């Protein structure tokens, strides 16, 4: 079994390497792949040092059975087909293939049967926010019949990758040093630091803008929630109203959801439906900080709606670099392996 990790030096790539080790994924040989800038860098995996290879090398995917991509949509569109042509199954963590009807979009606990057919040799990982929302919504859908949901996300800086983390870290110290401005002259404080990754200064702030504006007034980041949720759950008419917000958290997305169902629902019945669902835990008021580094998604603040007996309000959080990205990719790879889809297997 030869596995390539594309984007091996990034935040998600680091978690991919660690998870392949701790979950004892069958891997006889690993190929660490990144951009030309990182080529030659040494990465440790399963007790050995591996030199990072340049993604543009013509033979980089030779003999590869499985390629885990976490290098951005542009590189995935350009290079995933190369890996497939070389004989690999690709699990892609970018937005490049999620909308393709011939590419399954999979949350391992929610719709694993989508892996029964992989016509292009590519499986897509959902957006990290959608991923975290899917577990409780699937549990509730199976019990009550999901019709619609309103979601407001509180997304960590790491949702923008390592550069998002770096920008937040760089802003904290200079703003804290002038912290009197945070309460007396906020606009002046915001100008003390630069921002290029996040839409506005993120440290000590909340930024209600992620992504690129669409014609309908929503951003492309917000539209991932309705588009991907409908595909994963197999509900083409599902009504979704999304708002995405960036918050000064390093790791861990959280989402406040108001879900509406065909059947009447109460908080007690909702909690009962979510209990025991794979990969999902329940807590009183879970926070991203407390659940950073954890594999599970956790729901809390479960409340009956004040006005509609068919609606339920709840909060869900999870590590966007783990279940929201690397962990699900490895779980998908494990499921593909179980289905004996990799080259050279019966």
Image (cartoon, helix red, strand yellow):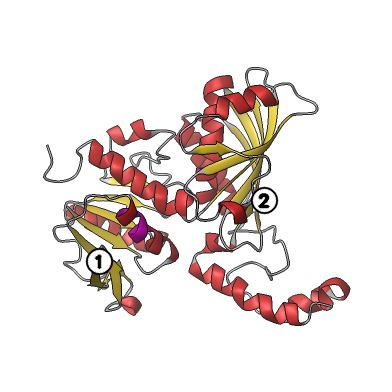
Quarter of the image with the C terminus in it: top left
- Residue 313: tell me if it is visible: yes
Q: With respect to residue 131, does 181 lie above or below? A: below
Q: Earlier in the sequence, mark 1 or mark 2?
A: 1
Count of residue discs: 2
Q: With respect to residue 252, does 169 lie above or below? A: below
Residue 75 vs residue 275: left or right? left
Residue 246 vs residue 99: left or right? right
Which is more foreground, mark 1 or mark 2?
1
- Where residue 217 is drawn, which disc sits there? 2
Dot 2, how many residues are within 10 Å of its Cα: few (below 14), some (14-19), or many (20+)?
Answer: few
**What residue sits 66% from the left and 64% below the top?**
248
Distance, label 1 to label 2, CA atoms, is 50 Å
**Residue at which label 1 appears:** 47
- Where residue 37 is drawn, which disc sits there? none
Residue 204 vs residue 170: left or right? right
């Amino acid at each position: 079994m030869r596995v390539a990790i594309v984007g091996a030096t990034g935040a998600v790539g680091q978690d991919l390497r660690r998870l392949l080790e701790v979950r004892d994924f069958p891997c006889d040989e690993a190929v660490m792949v990144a951009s030309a800038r990182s080529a030659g860098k040494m990465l440790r995996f399963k007790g050995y040092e591996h030199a990072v290879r340049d993604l543009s090398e013509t033979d980089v995917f030779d003999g590869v059975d499985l390629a885990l991509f976490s290098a951005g949509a542009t590189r995935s569109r350009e290079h995933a087909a190369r890996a497939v042509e070389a004989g690999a199954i690709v699990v892609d963590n970018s937005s490049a293939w999620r909308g393709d009807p011939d590419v399954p979009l999979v949350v391992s606990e929610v719709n694993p049967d989508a892996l029964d057919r992989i016509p292009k040799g590519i499986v897509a990982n959902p957006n990290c926010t959608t991923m975290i929302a899917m577990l409780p919504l699937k549990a509730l859908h199976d019990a009550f019949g999901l019709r619609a949901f309103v979601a407001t996300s509180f997304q960590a800086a790491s949702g923008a990758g390592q550069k998002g983390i770096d920008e937040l870290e760089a802003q904290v110290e200079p703003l804290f040093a002038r912290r009197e401005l945070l309460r007396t002259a906020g606009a002046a404080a915001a100008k003390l630091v630069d921002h290029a990754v996040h839409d506005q200064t993120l440290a000590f702030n909340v930024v209600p803008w992620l992504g690129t504006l669409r014609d309908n007034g929503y951003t492309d980041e917000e539209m991932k929630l309705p588009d991907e949720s409908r595909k994963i759950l197999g509900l083409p008419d599902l009504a979704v109203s999304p708002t995405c917000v960036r918050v000064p958290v390093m790791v861990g997305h959280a989402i406040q959801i108001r879900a509406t169902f065909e059947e009447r629902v109460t908080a007690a019945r909702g909690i009962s439906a979510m209990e025991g669902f794979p990969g999902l835990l329940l807590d009183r008021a879970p926070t991203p900080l407390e659940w950073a580094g954890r594999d599970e998604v956790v729901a809390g603040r479960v409340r009956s709606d004040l006005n509609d007996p068919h609606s339920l309000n709840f909060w869900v959080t999870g590590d966007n670099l783990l279940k929201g990205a690397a962990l699900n990719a490895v779980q998908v790879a494990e499921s593909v392996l179980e289905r004996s889809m990799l080259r050279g297997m019966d």
